[in-house]
Amino acid sequence: MKMSFRAKRLERQNQRLAQAGKLNLVALMDIFTILVFFLMVNQSEVKVLQSNKDINLPRSVSEQLPSEKVMLTITASGVLVQGKPVWQGDWQQDSNNWLPELTEALTAELNYLANRAGPSPEQQPVGRALTILGDAATPYALLRQLMAICAATEYRDLSLAVEAMAPAVEAP
């Protein structure tokens, strides 16, 4: 039987709709390639340290980037090592009250971390690396005492974490 023009048109339309949709992968590959190159080019050299909303780091124009080290955090209410509370107390009290307890707790934790990490021959002359995160209002005397405790436990390669700020530009 002969098909009418309308029947032929409907059959062609049904055949066209029955075909599976095709995905143009070339366009997707182009987009992903551009995205990968964008991310590679714009990868920054900035290292983000553990953040603590209670600490306002001092500002500095330091250009040296931090590396992965043991983190010693000084808060208003205590000391944390690698995010683990080691000692809690009030800094405002007489240091004779809290210093022996702090020294014992911090020494024990740093010795534990050093033993767990094992010997590292390349760091023996300098000592193990440690970064101190302290509020800008932390008294220097307290920092000095903590650095002395760290130095006594093989952590002598000390760094103080600061918030980077842009260097001042001189006007011509």
Image (cartoon, rainbow, N blue to C red):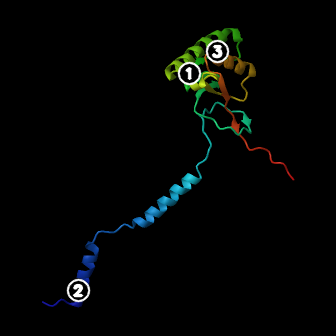
Are the residues tagged 2 and 3 within 8 Å (C-beta)?
Answer: no
- Amino acid bearing label 3: Ala
Q: Earlier in the sequence, mark 2 or mark 3?
A: 2
Frontmost residue, 165 versus 153: 153
Q: CA distance from mark 2 to mark 3?
A: 92 Å
Q: Closer to the camera: disc 1 or disc 3? A: 3
**Between residues 112 and 94, which one lies in front from this camera angle?**
112
Residue 160 x, y percent position in the rendering? 68, 29
Residue type for callout 1: Pro
- Which residue occupies 21% across, 85% down? 7
Q: Residue 17, located in which quarter of the rendered image?
A: bottom left
Q: Secondary structure at mark 1?
A: strand
Q: Which residue in the rendered view is the most extreme toward the left?
A: 1
Label 1 to label 3: alpha-carbon separation: 20 Å
Residue at the spot of label 3:
152
Which quarter of the rendered picture does the N terminus lie within? bottom left
How packed mark 2 is, by other alpha carbons closer than 10 Å (few <14, some 14-19, many 20 or more), is few
> Disc number at residue 37?
none
Residue assigned mark 2: 8
The amino acid on which the numbered mark 2 sits, given as a three-letter code, is Lys
Please tell me in which quadrant of the rendered image residue 58 appears: top right
